[in-house]
Image (tube, rainbow, N blue to C red):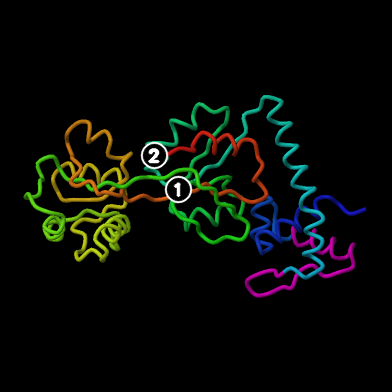
Amino acid sequence: MIDLTWYQSFIAIYRTGSVSRAAKARFLTQPAVSQHLAALEHAVGQPLFQRLPRRMLPTEYAKELYTQVAPALDALDITSQQLRLAADERPLVRVGGPPEYIGQVAMAKLLPLPLRLAVQFGMPQALIPLLEQGELDLVISSQRVPAMQVDYTLFAEEEFILIAASGHVPPEGDVEQLQRWMSVQPWLSYAADLPIIRRFWRQHFQVRPPFRPAVIIPDLRILVEAVALGHGLSVLPAYLCRQALAEGRIHELWRAPQPATNELWLATRRIDRDRPDLRQIADALRERV
């Protein structure tokens, strides 16, 4: 009889593409996972993977076996999770995402849920590989990083606004005059390539911004404070600016006819698509910010 753990290691290798990543996802050693694979290949009498330098490539037999076995094991895993929830345990959910959004928006919605949370901050390019490897359960992402076994669900839009200190006011004029005036002002940006500012500028003026940032600060919350202190202009998520706007420390310099927005995605592993705790989080977060 084939051991269930052999199938579990086989599925982990199939989904992650390597023995090392499968071992991390299953919290096992690499020799143990390799042993499981060898035992399964011996039991079925077929090689399941072609060993390449950087990847384990599944054979046609492995693809067929995966389609037969994976749904049943996924269903078993979901049933186990539901039984744990029914026993009134508070499951641990490991969430990754940007500190600004998590701190200003997500925490207020997630903390009331009957879950335990472990939060890790970072950019999508760093967090999605951790999700693939099973080190995170869910990632809040501003972009869809290509990943074989990751599903992305659109859950919100963030709006960007152009801000300046309350006393930093442009001369009266039309949009073209405003554009020329802004082109010679100091700009504060998250990164050297003006990621948010560039999107705003190209959408409204159809060209790339003709300036370099005067100040680079990789924290959007600090950028709000730097603008309020009068050090320049910036384009930032509206939810981060609400308090400073209400206090009169900054003002919206110009409201475009069509606001610049960005989509926010919930990234989960495909094997976790039906997890009830992740559905709870998705339902709590799903709104425009």
Give the residue type at disc 1: Leu
Residue 243: x %, y % from top left: 26, 33
* Residue shown at 39% from the left, 51% from the top: 262
Q: Which residue is mark 2?
A: 289
Q: Which residue is mark 1?
A: 264
Residue 145: x %, y % from top left: 50, 59
Give the residue type at disc 2: Val
Q: Describe residue 10's horizontal placement relative to residue 164 as left or right.
A: right
Looking at the picture, tell me which residue is in the foreground, 157 or 168: 157
Q: Describe residue 7's horizontal placement relative to residue 138 as left or right.
A: right
For label 1, the SS is: strand
Image quarter of residue 274:
top right
- Residue 197: in magenta span: no
Relative to 31, say whether 233 is above or below. above
Residue 249: x %, y % from top left: 17, 36
Q: Describe residue 43's horizontal placement relative to residue 49 as left or right.
A: right
What residue range appears in magenta? Answer: 32-57
